Image (cartoon, rainbow, N blue to C red):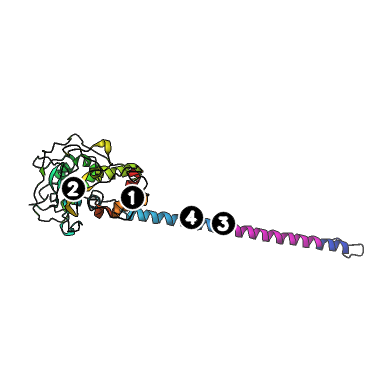
Amino acid sequence: MPRNASGQVDAGRRGLDRGTRLARNASNGFGSLKSRAIGRRFLTLRALAATIAQAVLCCGLVLLALTRAAPAETLFERGAYLVNTVAACGRCHTPRLAEGKPDPAMELAGGFAFADPAIGHIVGPNLTPDRETGLGKWSEEQIVTALRYGTRPDGTVIGPPMPVDTYRGMSDRDLAAIAKYLHTMKPIRHAVGRTQYKNPPEAHDPTITHIEGPPRQDRLAYGRYLAEPVGHCFGCHTVPRPGGASLDRGVFYAGGRDLPDYADVTRRVVSRNITSDPEDGIGKWSDAEVKRAIAAGIRPDGTRLAHTMPYDWYKAIAPADLDAITAYLR
């Protein structure tokens, strides 16, 4: 440190040096605090990023686990679903209790009979795998042939009201699924008569060989698929041509068909117009009202539909499928 002539440190210089040191120390202290703050912020951001990454990874693992936990629908499961919901096979093939409800102890055992003015005296066959009175001697391939081509193993033609002309539009997989379910369900020994036709049934088109179903993501296309080939809604909601062998496509879904009341087949009901016409159809109904009519058999005014409408089966239709059917009808 500089000294004066007497050898003593210059006071002014000493104060200046002290001020310099204090300023330097103060500057160093501020810089240290700033550096520590930045460091802490960096560590916090890095920890937050790590937490987010871990959360994303966990979500991915959970989704992967859920995907693996939901195996593809088996043929039997698909067949059981279609037969007991949208296709409503029991509507014609399950005997009825007194009030018109299906007899659960006789599921698909046949014997439900009624008269149709255009067709004749109709008797629903036994579809269970009983070897003597049902389909027990039929192979699954023969069941598919009956559904798509309307031909029994003995070569005879299956006539109306069996909706062969609509079932032929079902996908190969869905037909195989229905055959699988019918082939493996509980057999019931129940001998029934055969339908007596006014006119011999005509052979069906044998040329269709392969059908792919529409993607379920296409709601309108899938809704049409469920309502037509699978559910054959127009079978009851369209008047038949003379002879009953085919329907008048010019009035599809416009109603007016004479049908038996399934609670008492001696009484008759007339099917409703289910087009989107606002006056004669269901155009003024809300989506919720359409779904309620399908799945619960209740009109918007609260009155109940006849059991001819198979809501005893439709009540188990999956919500997404019911949405698709409603969207198509609208």
* Residue 199 among those drawn in magenta: no
Could you tell me which secondary element the residue under label 2 belongs to? helix
* Residue 33 among those drawn in magenta: yes
Could you tell me which secondary element the residue under label 1 belongs to? helix
Which tag, 1 or 2, sits closer to the chain's start? 2
Estimate the spatial distance between the alpha carbons at disc 1 and disc 4, rounded to whole Å.
46 Å
Residue on which the image places disc 4: 53
Which tag, 3 or 1, sits closer to the chain's start? 3
Residue on which the image places disc 2: 179
Q: What amino acid type should be assigned to the residue bearing mark 1?
A: Val
In percent of width and height, residue 203 lies at: 14, 36
Which tag, 1 or 4, sits closer to the chain's start? 4
Could you tell me which secondary element the residue under label 3 belongs to? helix
Q: What amino acid type should be assigned to the residue bearing mark 4?
A: Ala
Q: What amino acid type should be assigned to the residue bearing mark 2?
A: Ala
Left/right of residue 43 with respect to residue 174 in the rendered view = right
Estimate the spatial distance between the alpha carbons at disc 1 and disc 2, rounded to whole Å.
31 Å
Which tag, 4 or 2, sits closer to the chain's start? 4
Provide the major secondary structure of the magenta segment.
helix
Query: Which residue: 67% across, 59% down?
Result: 34
Foreground: disc 4 or disc 2: 2
